[in-house]
Amino acid sequence: MKISINSFHKAFESRIRLGIMSALAVNDMLDFNTLKEYLDVTDGNLASHIKALEKEGFIDVKKSFVGKKPNTKYFMTNEGKKAFDNHLKALENLIRGVSE
Amino acid sequence: MKAEQDYIRDIAEMRSMMERSSKFLSLSGWAGIMAGIYALSGAFIAYRILYFNPDEIVYDTIKSGNLSFSLLKVMLLAITILVLALGTAIFLSYKKAGKRGEKLWNPIAKRLLINMAVPLTAGGILILILVSKGLIGLIAPFTLLFYGLALYNASKFTYEDIRVLGLVEIALGLVSSFYIGYGLIFWALGFGVAHIIYGIYMHYRYER
């Protein structure tokens, strides 16, 4: 097989991280609880995956206040969008390669 | 390294997440069927029991005084149908969301509602104005038209199929504003028959 494994970023090895990126790819911004509901994971688990993606520079945080309650929203950075698109393309190529 | 099957599953899950997080998928086909049944019974009651069948744009008996009472009853009937249809839709969506392990109220539900509310509110206010001017014959065409616009708008945030239903309602609204005398029939077609057909289609396509 001549598929370049390099196009698979190691940040995307976890399915939860892929899920976070997928949800943020089609939404401008999502808050923590909404992400948690989509992914069906615990607070700590989600927080650690979010931190990892933040460290890669793939997602960023916007903090604001709703009344007096802090509200943290996450969005995908341009870099994250590029990495996600590349990953998706690589996956599609791989699957096409397999089926041919 | 992962196996090929893992990558295939990755991509399937990515697709599903992208759809789940951008579209409201808890709408039930049964909600359409029930709304259609309510609408058909409502149209029947309006026609056979309240003798409501305006055949001109300016419904002339409005001046004779007895219409205002019967009009009030028809509007009460219409509101009852609306509340029943909405209540059923919310209840069934709540059940379907629960089955899918999701909450009914989420950012997409909110986006869907806002996008429907704008054309519906504009249409509702316009219809109230028309009624106050005595243009009773335009109620049925305009409810169809604005409901169709709302559905068309909403289709971006839920099943795409709803766009077709929206176009059907818009077409029925336009045609019926030309044939005012058949307003009640077009209304029964749009809100009754079209909903039932759509509901059955959705039920067989997505819920079985």
Image (cartoon, helix red, strand yellow):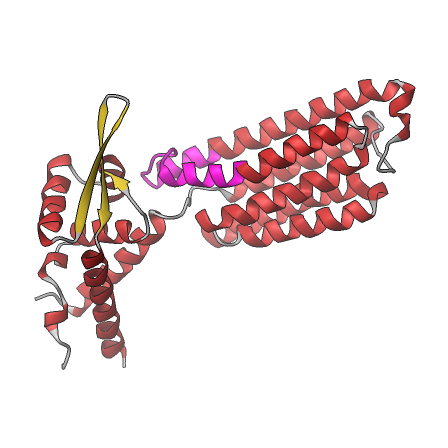
Q: Is residue B28 magenta?
A: no
- Does B134 sit left or right of B91 as displayed? right
Magenta region, main secondary structure: helix
User: Which span of residues is magenta-colored?
Assistant: B92-117
Residue A19 location, x and y as percent? 22, 51
Of residues B169 and B31, the one nearer the viewer is: B169
Which residue occupies 18% across, 40% down? A41
Quarter where residue B52 is shown: top right
Is residue B111 one of those drawn in magenta?
yes
Q: Nearer the viewer, residue B50 or B138?
A: B138
Whether residue A92 is visible to the viewer of this picture, yes or no, is yes
- Quarter assignment of residue A32: top left
Residue occupying image coordinates x 35% and y 41%: B100
Is B93 above or below relative to A27? above
Q: Residue B2's spot in the image, x, y percent?
A: 11, 65
Establish if B73 lies above or below A23. above
Which quarter of the rendering shows the N terminus of chain B? bottom left
Number of numbered discs present?
0
Residue B35 in the image, given as x and y percentages of width and height: 61, 37
Task: Determine if residue B208 is in view.
Answer: no
Question: How far across and down, in percent of the image, does residue B118 sit?
Answer: 54, 37
